[in-house]
Image: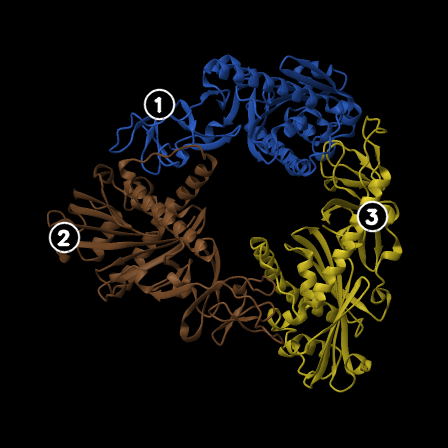
Chain colours: A brown, B yellow, C blue
Amino acid sequence: MFIKNAWYVACRPEELQEKPLGRTICGEKIVFYRAHKNKVAAVEDFCPHRGAPLSLGYVQDGNLVCGYHGLEMDCDGKVVSMPSQRVRGFPCNKSFATLEKYGFIWVWPGEQSLATAEALPVLQWAESHEWVYGGGLYHINCNYKLMIDNLMDLTHETYVHASSIGQKEIDDALPTTKVDGDRVMTERHMQNVEAPPFWKMALRGNHLADDIPVDRWQICHYYAPSNVHIEVGVAHAGHGGYHAAKDKKVSSIVVDFITPETETSHWYFWGMARNFQPDNDELTAQIREGQGKIFAEDLDMLEQQQQNILNNPERKLLMLNIDAGGVQSRKVIDRLLEQENQQHKIQNMNIA
Amino acid sequence: MFIKNAWYVACRPEELQEKPLGRTICGEKIVFYRAHKNKVAAVEDFCPHRGAPLSLGYVQDGNLVCGYHGLEMDCDGKVVSMPSQRVRGFPCNKSFATLEKYGFIWVWPGEQSLATAEALPVLQWAESHEWVYGGGLYHINCNYKLMIDNLMDLTHETYVHASSIGQKEIDDALPTTKVDGDRVMTERHMQNVEAPPFWKMALRGNHLADDIPVDRWQICHYYAPSNVHIEVGVAHAGHGGYHAAKDKKVSSIVVDFITPETETSHWYFWGMARNFQPDNDELTAQIREGQGKIFAEDLDMLEQQQQNILNNPERKLLMLNIDAGGVQSRKVIDRLLEQENQQHKIQNMNIA
Amino acid sequence: MFIKNAWYVACRPEELQEKPLGRTICGEKIVFYRAHKNKVAAVEDFCPHRGAPLSLGYVQDGNLVCGYHGLEMDCDGKVVSMPSQRVRGFPCNKSFATLEKYGFIWVWPGEQSLATAEALPVLQWAESHEWVYGGGLYHINCNYKLMIDNLMDLTHETYVHASSIGQKEIDDALPTTKVDGDRVMTERHMQNVEAPPFWKMALRGNHLADDIPVDRWQICHYYAPSNVHIEVGVAHAGHGGYHAAKDKKVSSIVVDFITPETETSHWYFWGMARNFQPDNDELTAQIREGQGKIFAEDLDMLEQQQQNILNNPERKLLMLNIDAGGVQSRKVIDRLLEQENQQHKIQNMNIA
């Protein structure tokens, strides 16, 4: 069960150039391609002629051509031509709303008529020259909600990421969690601690001393359907922490777009946006490499956790205070799923 | 569901030398080996003693010896000996009719008593010194009927094989399709076109100019149960095309034996028989390499098409004029399957 | 269906050092680790917090720490701490009785209260300075009973291990089989035969002539639940065979501990204990390498046999005189399984 009427990151622009891209999102097998004026189109990845995947085809004059027998489809899923055929009666493919914004390509896997640009999250960092972003993509064999849990409970850093961003003080600083509509926020502040290695590197990158105590913060924001953005940073201790002046801190946003593929797999678009040294490409590469290694440490844990849960369907998991962020996020998801189901029922009644 | 009472290519002679060969054909797990006088024997690949695969054994005095505990079986599936055992009461294995002819080893996976040499297709090219054959074998994870469709609708050449045998004019030349009993023929003729790269190579191989317009033909013959042979060629334009004199054309037969393995996989014995420069081994090797590359281009498309169809069982595929060859071939298959089922029912009634 | 109330070899000590070890035994996913005073602990490999596998964690102060969020469990499966949590109400994990003896770590996958040290087999060779052991571990994708069959019917040596320990005379020397409670013994003696290559190597290793006839013996002992130990050896012919004086023979025990994983896979701890030249490490390594190669020859046969049996559920296998050892061993297993089921029913009645 997925929230279908919502925007998900489908891919990065660099994944979608001349060739079409096939990707399954929320259980829908979709082919993405660049139509007229570079606009991204998305239709079912199934040729109505003989069932070939259209993603093995190519783009011509803004339309998608099936690589098997040349059926040509437009961005609305309508067949516009096929060699020596009259195509007027051909069935249409489902098409999907897309947007290209903030350096990502977004898709709305549900009812196209409900898709509005306003429903897209507002990402200020993505449009400001004071910020820079670097990131990557992992395919992970676990349900997307296990990744939301992971990101909304950062006590795991102490164990999974002990050598980079983990530190014992995370365990001692209990988080506080708030729910605001379809958003959940869970935050944690640590005072007067030693910066862990990743943050020492960032301090040096911003020309700040890395050998004096810092105040550290982690503010996790869950946005429906399945995005988690985490404000993270350290400031030299005693200068106000999160609110410290710019020359006393390094801060950034861990940007996580979690796109379900199947019930037991998802696409994980991870990255970091920062507002210090935005023009330092070397630092961007260094941070990205570090973050890529850190997030790879979660992969095995999450995939084996998924297997364990599948093999023990009768076991109930605990919901502790540290899990509040994940638990509340799942409640939002359940509520939105219920709403979609109700709308769906009403629609079907109106049709009948 | 497979037509069981028919000859299928089981393997090439070079695959069956000293060692037994295990291969599943039409759902039957069979072990092939060379018995007395080099005759090919085929029995169930299951040792009646403890279920070991007999294909892991060896051949001795014309019998098959199980590699686990030495049970010895003759070519009729009868156990003839086992160390220190009286084997008279041992159950028999099912055995299968085989033939070795035309450079192939054939098997009849159904009722052995119905197998006759007359039921084998007549392959004149395989017994004439004026012809030479080269080919290979691919294992493909799709139902065999998708391969029949592929070969009976060559408009796919324009898309899948664009750099070798495809050309836009194929799309424009509509085929005509005829059914004659258990045979289907679909043919296409193109006049005054440029030869595509593969055919230019063949023209040069036959010492003919490759830079002048040609007439090109493709005559696809489906034979039950699942063989497709395609007469193909080009002639210098205006000399009669298919009927042109030998010194004005290059022509050959694309020879495809399609042997079902399971409902979603088959053995694809592909090759080409030609009657020009039959003694030129280098040319044979060159053509075979080219054809091998061309046919490998179909693999990914066919396997992903199979997956798409499995994942969308409710979707109906289109049947266009270009699909007539495949559609008619499937009708022959359905009719023969129905006949086999009826015979089977009558047999069971007689037994009861 | 597995006999749960019995000792199985879980692992070799060298597999269990600092890091925990996850292994599935008789369908139970277990994590093993070294607790206080190096004692081996074994609990369910499932963190009660969020289902992470505990085997990805680490050991601290004799307890097992989950590598995801730091839950700490003792060797009884009780949660003893978790950062910033009161853990009194946390559910317990199932724990398992273990023993470390004879150079192996043993586990009792059933009811812990029934586990007694007395139930462990007595292995005299493992505690004597006159003996030395070398061995290894294979993971094999077949039911453990197929391995018992394999080891209780050594006629397969002639076919599977023709170049090392097989010889035609094995087939001719019919075995005799006896049942004694939960034990089965099947033995075979050959007189005045040529020693096969493996035994020639062993004779030379013990400074005995390898080019004169020998008497050879194989005495297979099945112990419940699934261990097979085989007394094997050769003596210069005419000196009493199995009972010959020490300076006329080489003898050893093939030590096989067969630990079920799932219904179609098992852990195979193979090895050899010998009482000649016990201090010759080079010879130990040489024998172990030879035995490892020989036992690897069984792998493919057993795994394909398993597949064949799964694919032909309706076919009954034969039970010949040579199979008596395996057949009787299976009867012991069936009887013990039935006993366990009865006890289980009685327990459930008492609870109800």
Q: How many labels does the image show?
A: 3
Residue B103 on image: x %, y %: 81, 59
Query: Which is more toward the observer, C76 or C346?
Result: C346
As displayed, is residue A203 above or below residue C302? below
Residue A109 on image: x %, y %: 42, 58
Q: Which of the chains bears the disc numbered 3?
A: B
Residue located beneath label 2 in the image: A243
- Amino acid carrying mark 3 in the image: Gln
Instruction: Please rate how many residues cluster around mark 2, counting C-alpha atoms within 10 Å: few if below 14, some from 14 to 19, many from 20.
Output: few
Residue located beneath label 3 in the image: B343
Residue B242: numbered disc: none
Q: In which quarter of the image is residue A250?
A: bottom left
**Residues at badges 3 and 1 in contact (C-beta under 8 Å)?**
no
- Amino acid carrying mark 1 in the image: His
Q: Are tags 2 and 1 found on a single chain?
A: no
Q: Which of the chains bears the disc numbered 1?
A: C
Residue located beneath label 1 in the image: C36
Disc 2 to disc 3, C-alpha distance: 86 Å
Residue B240 on image: x %, y %: 79, 84
Q: Are tags 2 and 3 found on a single chain?
A: no
Disc 2 to disc 1, C-alpha distance: 47 Å
Q: What element carries label 2?
A: helix
Q: In which quarter of the image is residue B89?
A: top right
- Amino acid carrying mark 2 in the image: His
